Image (tube, rainbow, N blue to C red):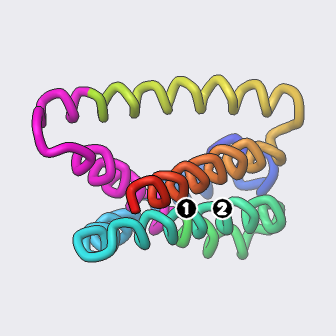
Amino acid sequence: MADFLKNVSLMNGRQISMMLFLFGTVGIFGNKMAGNYMSRFPFETTFIFLILLIGIHLLIYYYGGFFIPMIGIICFWGLIHSGGFLISNINVTSSTSGSPELINSVFTSCGNFAVTAGTLLGGFWISHYGIKNIVWSSVICITGALLILILKKKLIE
């Protein structure tokens, strides 16, 4: 995010620090919202989260070079993105009723794998397509997650 803001949005170090702070601060409210909705509408909340995340990445791609729009996009991104940690945690831990220790271990392992795979894919994507196009790797992965969510819902019904 910092490299994108530096190289595409042309923000300086102070502005980037402020944007990262803003992203994290707004994320606190995103966690609260995700928790409220996940307890009542888990599938719908996850579905909407993924759709909004794709939309945010498209906004980043099209408006990433503009300072003022990026401030609003970063706020919205932080609000949605941070709720994703809770959404994924609830989806994984509610997938079974037994062995909470095993499920928590699997969740942590999946999170570590996601960071590793995302870093690998992101680095590959940046080196081949440039920093501005990094959002497309995210859009592809999020679309895959959306398809898996829909498939899971169809198989359970």
Q: Position of residue 113 (x, y in %)?
A: 46, 25
In the rendered structure, find residue 54 and report the number of the disc placed on it. 2
SS at mark 2?
A: helix
Q: Position of residue 141 (x, y in %)?
A: 65, 44
Residue in front for this viewpoint, 11 or 135? 135
Residue numbers of the magenta segment = 78-105
Quadrant position of residue 96 = top left
Q: Position of residue 43 (x, y in %)?
A: 40, 66
In the rendered structure, find residue 84 and report the number of the disc placed on it. none
Q: Quadrant of the C terminus?
A: bottom left
Image-based side of 13 in relation to 37, left or right = right
Q: Give the vertical position of 68 relative to 23 (above or below).
A: below
Quadrant position of residue 131 = top right
Q: Residue at x 55, y 59 (%)?
A: 19
Counting other residues with Cα less than 10 Å from the Cα at mark 1, is it few (<14), some (14-19), or many (20 or more)?
A: many
Q: Is residue 105 visible?
A: yes
Disc 1: which residue: 50
Magenta region includes residue 10: no
The count of marks equals: 2
Whether residues under marks 2 and 1 lie with C-beta atoms below 8 angstroms apart, the answer is yes
Callout 2, which amino acid?
Answer: Ile
Q: Residue at x 77, y 57 (%)?
A: 9
Q: Is residue 25 visible?
A: no
Callout 1, which amino acid?
Answer: Leu
Counting other residues with Cα less than 10 Å from the Cα at mark 2, is it few (<14), some (14-19), or many (20 or more)?
A: many
Residue in front for this viewpoint, 75 or 92? 92
Instruction: Estimate the spatial distance between the alpha carbons at disc 2 and disc 1, rounded to whole Å.
Output: 6 Å
SS at mark 1?
A: helix
Image-based side of 155 in relation to 28, left or right = right
Q: Residue at x 61, y 75 (%)?
A: 72
Q: Position of residue 117 (x, y in %)?
A: 57, 26
